[in-house]
Image: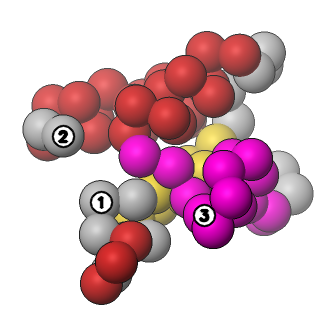
């Protein structure tokens, strides 16, 4: 995870109507939430134990699947 990669995924999320928020503390360090700007709800990652959080790579893949 690099700062450049984080900025790239942030721009990708913003272009699709989401914001990328850091949520990781403790065992979840390095995880992010994708929040829908219009609804204010978090996107479901579908990962057991981390239903609403993503790594940058997971967020990038999830955003690639989602249309605007």
The quarter of the image holding the N terminus is top left
Q: Nearer the viewer, residue 15 or 30?
A: 30
Q: Does the magenta segment cover residue 49?
A: yes
Q: For label 1, count other residues whose C-alpha is less than 10 Å away and answer few (under 14), some (14-19) or many (20+).
A: some
Q: Does the magenta segment cover residue 63?
A: no
> Which residues are drawn in magenta?
40-55
Q: Is residue 53 visible?
A: yes
Q: Work out whether mark 2 precedes mark 3 in sequence or the reverse, and give the earlier one.
A: 2
| Disc 1 target residue | 30
Q: For label 3, count other residues whose C-alpha is less than 10 Å away and answer few (under 14), some (14-19) or many (20+).
A: few
- Check residue 50 in the rendering and tell me which mark sits there, or answer none: 3
Q: Nearer the viewer, residue 2 or 19?
A: 2
Q: Position of residue 54 (x, y in %)?
A: 51, 49
Residue displayed at 68% across by 58% down = 48
| Disc 2 target residue | 1
Residue pushed farthest bottom?
Answer: 26
Q: Position of residue 9 (x, y in %)?
A: 40, 31
Query: Which marked residue is nearer to the observer: mark 3 or mark 1?
Result: 3
User: Considering only vertical position in the picture, is 41 above or below 37?
Assistant: below
Secondary structure mostly seen in magenta is loop
Q: For label 2, count other residues whose C-alpha is less than 10 Å away and answer few (under 14), some (14-19) or many (20+).
A: few
């Amino acid at each position: 995870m690099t700062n450049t990669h984080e900025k790239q995924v942030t721009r990708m999320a913003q272009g699709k109507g989401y914001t990328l928020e850091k949520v990781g503390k403790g065992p979840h360090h390095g995880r992010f939430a994708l929040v829908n700007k219009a609804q204010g709800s978090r996107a479901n990652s579908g990962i057991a134990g981390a239903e609403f959080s993503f790594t940058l790579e997971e967020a990038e893949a999830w955003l690639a699947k989602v249309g605007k």
